[in-house]
Structure formats: C-alpha cells, structure tokens
Image (tube, helix red, strand yellow):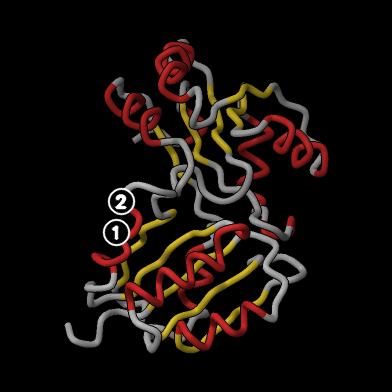
Amino acid sequence: MASQKEIASCLYLVPTPIGNLSDMTPRALGVLSSVDLILAEDTRVSNKLLMHFNIEKSLKSFHSQNEHRSYEMIVDKLKTGLKMALVTDAGTPGISDPAYLLVRACRTEGIPVIALPGATAFVPALVASGLPCDKFYFNGFLPQKKGRSGQIKWLATLPCTTILYESPHRILKCVDELIQGFGPGRQACFAKEISKIHEHYFTGTLEEIKHQLLEAKILGEWVIVVGGCPDQ
C-alpha cells in the first residue's frame, strides 16, 4: 500500500476551527502547507486563517452554490496529479457543508480521499449535553419552510437523541416549535458558540430552556440536542 508521501493526486478533507484557533491540528496545518490548491467555502474567511498560520497557498471558491457545476472540473485537475485540500468556514467538510458530490466523484475516478479528524460542532455538544450519546440521530438544519413541522413531528418519535443545527435569528422560534412537537417536558441541551469565548450550555426541559433563552444573548451559532422519546 502506498504511503501518503507516495500518492500523486489526492483530495484532503481538512477540518478548521469552529471558534478557538488553537483547535487547529499540526497535521491539518501540514496538509494545508503541502497541497497545490485549497478549495474554500469562502476564500476571504480561509485566507484569514491561512494568514494567521503564515501559510501562503492559492485558493479556489467551492461552496453550495457552485458545487454542482464545478466538481467535475476539479476532478479533472486532480487527475493531472495535483493535491488539493477542501476546507469550509468552520468545522469538518461534508457536515452540513459541501463535500459529498466531490468526494463521490473522486471515489468513482479512483482518486484517493483522505479525511482528517478534527473540529465539528455537534460532537462536543452531544457529549457535554448529559443526554444519552450511545445512539443518536444527526439531522443538521431543519427545512426553513416546507416540511419543517412534519420533520419535527417525526423526530419527536425517535427513541434516540436528536441533534439539530440552528441559526441565532431562528432559535426562539425553533424552541417553540420543538415544544409543540416534542412536548414541553422533553429533556434537551442548547449549546451556543462552542469553543468560543461566550460558549454556553442551556439544559433542562424544553420549556425551561425557553425561559432561559428569553433572558440570554442569543447571538452565535447553535447546536440543539434533544432526548429521545421515552415511550419508545
């Protein structure tokens, strides 16, 4: 089996910090320093990260709006022997962010794909929630409009812990929707700004968390962890 150094073309999936820059791993920095091109969700965000670590590399935009029309061209470039790294603004590529289409195409063409372990928001939220984490369902973001209430009702029936992502401007609406779908007494944990200065966990029943949120600053990204249905 060829070692990493012997691989000609390769796509690396590189997690980036979700808040604290100290979460960047030495291996991730080594990969970003060694590749020929970095695919970035937002080149402005990634450029700031690279500048912080004194890495000078060419960046190419790769995000949800251009993923469908650009992944084939990227695969063609990889087939010439280039090494590329894919990064998102924060966290692990592919978790509620682009990566799937490109990775699938690389696998089809026999191009090696190496995913580095690293930062992702839902894992610390889950393990710090106090809710069962031996089995869980990661849902990511709920639909903004069509199908949202139906999906919440279905999630409420699951016997395992459910994990959601939510933005700050919808968090208060979301807790009301979860109370309606899951019931006010369902145990939950709302994690805010994980790994950042204002990281905070709101725990208790959904009804109790609603009152906590009404008294709190709700800026920042959120991970919602909700206990499974006790009847299941």
Say whether residue 78 is left or right of residue 147.
right
Q: Secondary structure at mark 2?
A: loop
Q: Are marks 2 and 1 in contact (CB under 8 Å)?
A: yes
Q: Which residue is mark 2?
A: 147
Residue lying at 39% horizontally and 50% vertically, measured from the top left: 143
Residue 188 x, y percent position in the rendering: 44, 81
Q: Quadrant of residue 112?
A: top left
Q: Secondary structure at mark 1?
A: helix
Question: Disc number at residue 151?
Answer: 1
What's under tag 2, amino acid-wise? Gly
Dot 1 alpha-carbon crowd within 10 angstroms: few under 14, some 14 to 19, many 20 or more:
some
Residue at image x 65%, y 36%? Answer: 32
What residue appears at the point 44 percent right and 39 percent down from the top-left corner? 114
Q: Give the residue type that dot 1 points to.
A: Gln
Label 2 neighbour load within 10 Å: few <14, some 14-19, many 20+ = few
Q: Nearer the viewer, residue 167 or 133?
A: 167
Residue at figure coordinates x 79%, y 38% from the top left: 48
